Image (spheres, coloured by chain):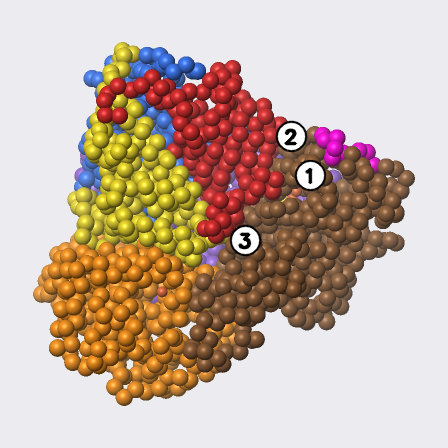
Chain colours: A yellow, B red, C blue, D orange, E brown, F purple
Amino acid sequence: MSKPGVTPERLAYLDLLREIEDFFFNEADLLDERDYDRWLELLAEDIVYWMPMRKNVSYANRHDDVTAENDIAWFHDDKDTLRKRVKQIQTGIHWADEPISRVSHLITNVRLREPRPSLAEGDQATTKCRFIVYRNRLEDETDLLVGRREDTLVRTGGQLKIARRKIILDQSVLLAKNLTMFF
Amino acid sequence: MSKPGVTPERLAYLDLLREIEDFFFNEADLLDERDYDRWLELLAEDIVYWMPMRKNVSYANRHDDVTAENDIAWFHDDKDTLRKRVKQIQTGIHWADEPISRVSHLITNVRLREPRPSLAEGDQATTKCRFIVYRNRLEDETDLLVGRREDTLVRTGGQLKIARRKIILDQSVLLAKNLTMFF
Amino acid sequence: MSKPGVTPERLAYLDLLREIEDFFFNEADLLDERDYDRWLELLAEDIVYWMPMRKNVSYANRHDDVTAENDIAWFHDDKDTLRKRVKQIQTGIHWADEPISRVSHLITNVRLREPRPSLAEGDQATTKCRFIVYRNRLEDETDLLVGRREDTLVRTGGQLKIARRKIILDQSVLLAKNLTMFF
Amino acid sequence: MAMNGRWGYRSGMVDLRRGEISREIFVNEDIYAEEQERIFARAWLHVGHESQIPKPGDYFVSSMGEESVILCRDRTGRIHVFLNSCRHRGMKVCRYDEGSAAVFTCPYHGWSFGTDGRLVGVPYYREAYHSRLDKEKWGLIEVAQLANYKGSIWATWDPAAPSFTEYLGGFTRYLDLQLDGWDGREGQAEVLCGVQKWMVPCNWKFPAENFSGDTYHNISHRSVDLAGIGPSGRSRRDLGERDVSRKLHVCIPDRGHQTILYVLPADKVPPPAYMNAPIVAEYFRHCEQERRRLRGQEARLVGAPGEIFPNTALLSRQPRTMAGWHPRGPHRTECWRWYFVDRDAPTEVKQFLRDYYIRYSGPAGMTEQDDMENWNYAHVASGGTVARRRPYHYKAGLGAGGRHAVIPGVVTEQPITSEQNPRFFYKRWAEYLDMGSWDELLDAQRAAV
Amino acid sequence: MAMNGRWGYRSGMVDLRRGEISREIFVNEDIYAEEQERIFARAWLHVGHESQIPKPGDYFVSSMGEESVILCRDRTGRIHVFLNSCRHRGMKVCRYDEGSAAVFTCPYHGWSFGTDGRLVGVPYYREAYHSRLDKEKWGLIEVAQLANYKGSIWATWDPAAPSFTEYLGGFTRYLDLQLDGWDGREGQAEVLCGVQKWMVPCNWKFPAENFSGDTYHNISHRSVDLAGIGPSGRSRRDLGERDVSRKLHVCIPDRGHQTILYVLPADKVPPPAYMNAPIVAEYFRHCEQERRRLRGQEARLVGAPGEIFPNTALLSRQPRTMAGWHPRGPHRTECWRWYFVDRDAPTEVKQFLRDYYIRYSGPAGMTEQDDMENWNYAHVASGGTVARRRPYHYKAGLGAGGRHAVIPGVVTEQPITSEQNPRFFYKRWAEYLDMGSWDELLDAQRAAV
Amino acid sequence: MAMNGRWGYRSGMVDLRRGEISREIFVNEDIYAEEQERIFARAWLHVGHESQIPKPGDYFVSSMGEESVILCRDRTGRIHVFLNSCRHRGMKVCRYDEGSAAVFTCPYHGWSFGTDGRLVGVPYYREAYHSRLDKEKWGLIEVAQLANYKGSIWATWDPAAPSFTEYLGGFTRYLDLQLDGWDGREGQAEVLCGVQKWMVPCNWKFPAENFSGDTYHNISHRSVDLAGIGPSGRSRRDLGERDVSRKLHVCIPDRGHQTILYVLPADKVPPPAYMNAPIVAEYFRHCEQERRRLRGQEARLVGAPGEIFPNTALLSRQPRTMAGWHPRGPHRTECWRWYFVDRDAPTEVKQFLRDYYIRYSGPAGMTEQDDMENWNYAHVASGGTVARRRPYHYKAGLGAGGRHAVIPGVVTEQPITSEQNPRFFYKRWAEYLDMGSWDELLDAQRAAV
Ligand code: FES
Ligand code: FES
Ligand code: FES
Ligand SMILES: [Fe+3]
Ligand SMILES: [Fe+3]
Ligand SMILES: [Fe+3]
């Protein structure tokens, strides 16, 4: 690292990471601007969109602090269900989000779980990041939802798509009255 | 993307995006360290600094959720007004911010609205990002202001400057008692 | 900046900055996934880990808003003390963090205080960033700790290490009942 | 918060004859405090299910009213419910959500309590207490009575309360609909791992009255009907069964429990359900067949939302869940939701239902989300000085209920809706606040339908 | 919160003779609750302006005391104000800030109300209610009285309240200064789109007393004076007019309204204003000229901060705004600010003023920011046990007021300051709490200046 | 919040004979409000240390009960304590944490107060007040009595309170252990710059009783003992001294102060301490030697946690700190912690101790963190309806205390633990609530050990 020459592999890595960041930031813009139809296009057809619940466990059980894959979760959706969630909001009479909420998605700490120089067609890579979802609606209703996300991205037809999303919310008792927003 | 070769245009894009991030992060440091005079230097002389108010609207009217350009806003300042705001704080008797508040600006999700390889002298580009402005003052007074920002940057004399800033705060009833901070 | 050619020094800078971000983001993952032993490996043996307290001061005294190096602080730890903090949590009976808390570290605004193309073996560089540490535990106990960090990184054996960390928390009266988490 | 004028519950706040109920009871802090004493410290409350604590030493931390309790199985396999607070200085003794333990050791001074609640360990018992501490008297505070009804666990703090069976009164068979198997066998229910817990800014009685049988708010769910999340790909749920049935509003007035009930025709098989998943559809077709074989005429009864007084909701069909509405101050409710399957259902069926349940119910549930928005803002809009002067309106179906030849309780047959059930819920609520003794409470007149 | 000792408002808490007022009235929760009943449910409150709802069906959601109300224009063009809460189960029926509607349909069970408040749609009216629901009785709760005064809309919940004109008493002409045109024509005011709403952690009476005429706190605004945000580039505002005028503190003691008033000299034209913008300066020069022509002697009166009891602030000159101080508990106030221009002013003028208004007022306003800091921390520092034992000090100008030949009300001419106006504000406040009937209230002695 | 039944403090809530104390006193809002009047507005409270305000004009903003106060030194060097609230309209007059000032100028209307509290500046004194404002009467509210005890500053709002010395009663010499030098010289203590302030969600009496002498909760600190943060690299602190000493629980029943006390053997030098740092070890070896030389037999007394009624904690050895438990509502306490060294200790010693102190105490302190977790969740688990029916248990060492030949107060010698000290803390607490006059309070029976 001490000489100014940067290897082509390293350049490719910088490029890929920026591509992924751009992908997530674009996704956040689509969600916060409520362009849900284009958001759905970012999801692979066989996406697994999973938000398990959190458990209060001891340090010894620290790796067992989310409900298991087959247990009750907050979300465990396939693309069809996500489409229905979008459709519901778009009816304009989904009262839980009508009037529409003001939502911001902040995505930080984006990294590849295993660094790699590139992502070829059909390849998958898993990323980690942190999120803050801030929601404010009507007069003073405000929620702050914070946690981390593990996304598996796949390149399909040159484009990145989300093949799997695991959302680890840092709450056990959910302090929001509902989860009308996407993560 | 599957070959390690990164095109010069792409490299230039990586470079530009990092330059913009550095610019915003430097700006945040100037604000949070209260180096307001140097902060003012980052603003173009004809800057439009605008924070409209938010409205509770239906999904159908989702694109009409801020007050219009000529309506009442939280801020709609030119550079001269911004200078006066700075001057007021610097008097040391602007009680709303004296003793000084502790403020952090967190800027995330920085992207170019339209990706481009570079920004030549005199050119403009519009960026999007999310912000969190956290303020704590005196004993336990705390505000968390979250939203998104659209900035138009212009290159002048080699340097980036902010030509226009639109701040979209995710609150309708403002839950802070005042807005003494910059965004 | 108007031509697509990016200089080798600039490429090296992009590379270094990304290396630093990756370093911090990896660190955040180790903390939030409670892999404390590997976290300790990121710290130089002679690390100074310091979180001064904040003071309510006038604008004129704005540069004197933290307690001095020899005053009482929230933290002023050497590596040995940090090791003991880790050890305490690992006993599984450190009740303040048992059951384990849910913690997310969000690191944003990462920049070099003085831009430089590279960091050679033995060299040091100081970075600035913002942090949000969100903690939620048991039922509804929630803390949001926000501020900035100045880290001095050193390259040792090819790896980055943290030689000094100054944590500037944006609270004067601490609004959390304790500080069991690392920053 | 001041209250608008004086009140006496039965005569003033809850006017069953006119079908009007004061907004005060939802927002007044003094009334809330009385509820804690008069209702939550006396009534039988749902705590959990034995499938959550299958083995000796297993525990699940639950809630009764505002308070944390430990549901656990002692070394001998007996089930207990304890207040989760040390007898020494009050520290919460169990701080994990669930698990298995030999003893509960208090973090503060180290007293430890057996899974039977007995104080078994006192550090320095001899030195500090000269061995004179009477351990028998300072075990964990245990509920006064506990009942295991087909696996569901219920408890009350009141030693004078009647037995759970007497408390249920004629409602037993509607609770059976929740707990018995889809194929008609007794008590087959099993809780899916993971109880949802979340906070809603409203008084706890909003969800309670909703589940007591508010079928009038269907219109509020039109968006999810349009989206079509049901297990056959349409609407909210499979409606074939309901479409061919008679719909009854049923309540047990002297007990305070209510449910909606569908009665299938004697002669007609309901249309198939779960058409989105052939394996599931086939499983339920089989179960329905079995149920009719085993239960005969009784198999014609099909459950729907119900409420066991005061704060337990039932939903025995799609999606099959129970809920608890735990008061957290007058303006906030912590909702808990348990999801049920039959324990020996095929894994595919369990998974299919799991997915369906959570897209329907709970905070991410596309149906329940809209309910909570209503409860939230009905509550908010009811707290003001002027609002509190005007009662809520509970007149739908006023005077329509009567006794039924077969179905216990007061029954209104109404294809659309009736507010009989909420009315009876508040009748019972008023009795709890007005009546100091169980003699009175068990003898309460069946007045004012 | 406990209170320090007993009180009787007029005699104990509010001592006008000594100019001392107990801190208790700002922080005590019981007093706060009484205020809701005695003041906000009886007094005339400002709701909005007709320019906000120009067309039939237009509505604007406003606030009266703690409660949400709908200001709307029905199909026939008549203006109404309704409590924003469904008569069925209380749900907020209108949840957008403003807009246009044919009916307000409740999200919960779908009752719908016309823009005249009538209950026009009840789903399953026949099936659920056997067509016996008396729709006439269950429309939206409407205010008891409404007044449209030169476009500004006012309402009261109390049918026994006097007419708005009687309520204003001699204050009418000061409200005119707010609503009439810069050029002297009647009622030219128009609200600029967008009402600012924000939360301040203080009792609602801090801003109210401030606007009643606290000219003593000018010193607190020195930082903005130094920064120089005024429309001529200096100070906070153009002071030329004030510099040549006499300054009066005016109040209408038996009504509780107050204002500061400047009286221009009969013979001298005030120096030019708005010098930062030639077009604007010229416009106002013209308007002033017109005003003097149309109004004659009366044109010498120039408005300044004022307060219409209880919670509406006026500011008729620079910047021209009205504010509402909505109580949100004893320790929190939701401030609303409307900004005014003359409806036919040139666009350049409107824009110039808009920019000036919002850099002066509201939460980003460089002047009002410092006020709110004071209100916030005066409130905080007044809640403690020891603090509450010592009254506030309102002695400036004690005994100085008197009657004036021309100006209605009690008038103190004081170039610097007097606390006459806050004193009379609290006098009226005490009368509202002490007096149960409007007869008493309208007859209140003009004691204790 | 409603309360479970009626109470009379001494007879009902605090039962010293049985060693049982009602949970009600920790969670009830009415009791909390009474505490503010009866305890915090009457008792002597710790405010700070003169080393924090060495020069004329220096000030430090402190807290008494719920309220902000200014500790300052006037131009003549005299120390004062004032309520931090303007006499005009209540604004907080000093908003910096500490510093130096000639006057305190109120931001709102500019009244200014000298460092002796006198109202020295009133803008427009002549014009606004006709020079009739009696400045002598409207200075800052000063405490009724102030005491400087060996540099520590104490104050009370009650003019009828006894002197601080009488208030301390026999406790004086234990406070000396905190304030005298390590080498036995009088009053050598100096505060390290920076007072820690942080919020804990519990009633203020949890930390108070803990520091009164709860040595029983040692077990809760096992994790830090295992981590070994002590100044010799092991355990929490150097235990050599304690290991060879006798351990006494001491309290002054008619004053309400308590402490743990170690008595070194007459004949044996305690083992060395601070072995992690040779310079520090040598310094303390020297100090100990000096102390024995200067103080003789008295040097055998070694302090440990103590509590001066109501809310000041002492810890005179490792780590040497004082704390204040400031009530912020019944459910929240703002903890303040001052750290002490001897003023002429070498810099290396000060730094070494500084590091040790803050890794032990305060919110980042590896020991105190676990205490706060206990206080937090003991509080939470005690607020429920059922929990409040059962008292806490304070029976350890019941009946064991007695008088001692040399040590003042009631003394229990118990190598392990006794709850004598918390019992006497609550005895005094009950007396403050029950007794209206200081005559009664100073005469309180020494009943019920
Ligand atoms: S609080 Fe449980 S042992 Fe003391
Ligand atoms: S609450 Fe409005 S229709 Fe039921
Ligand atoms: S409040 Fe201090 S001068 Fe008015
Ligand atoms: Fe529903
Ligand atoms: Fe002002
Ligand atoms: Fe401890």
Q: Quick check: is A181 in the magenta stretch? A: no
Q: For the residue with label 3, is its CB less than 8 Å from the closest atom of ligand 2?
A: no
Name the quarter where the C terminus of chain C is drawn: top left
F144, D379: nearer the viewer = D379
**Residue located at (35% from left, 42% from top):** A39
Disc 2 is attached to a residue of which chain? E
Disc 3 is attached to a residue of which chain? E
State the CA–CA distance, disc 3 to disc 2. Answer: 35 Å
Q: How many marks?
A: 3
Q: Are marks 1 and 2 in contact (CB under 8 Å)?
A: no
Q: Quick check: is E271 in the magenta stretch? A: yes
Name the quarter where the N terminus of chain C is drawn: top left
Q: Given the image, on which type of amino acid does mark 1 rest?
A: Thr
Marker disc for residue D158: none
From the viewer's perspective, tell me whether residue D98 is left or right of residue C59. left
Q: Are marks 3 and 1 in contact (CB under 8 Å)?
A: no
Disc 3 residue crowd, few under 14, some 14–19, many 20+, Cα 10 Å: some
F323, F410: nearer the viewer = F323
Q: Given the image, on which type of amino acid does mark 2 rest?
A: Ala
Residue position marked by numbered label 3 in the rendering? E97
**Residue located at (59% from left, 25% from top):** B46
Magenta span:
E270-281
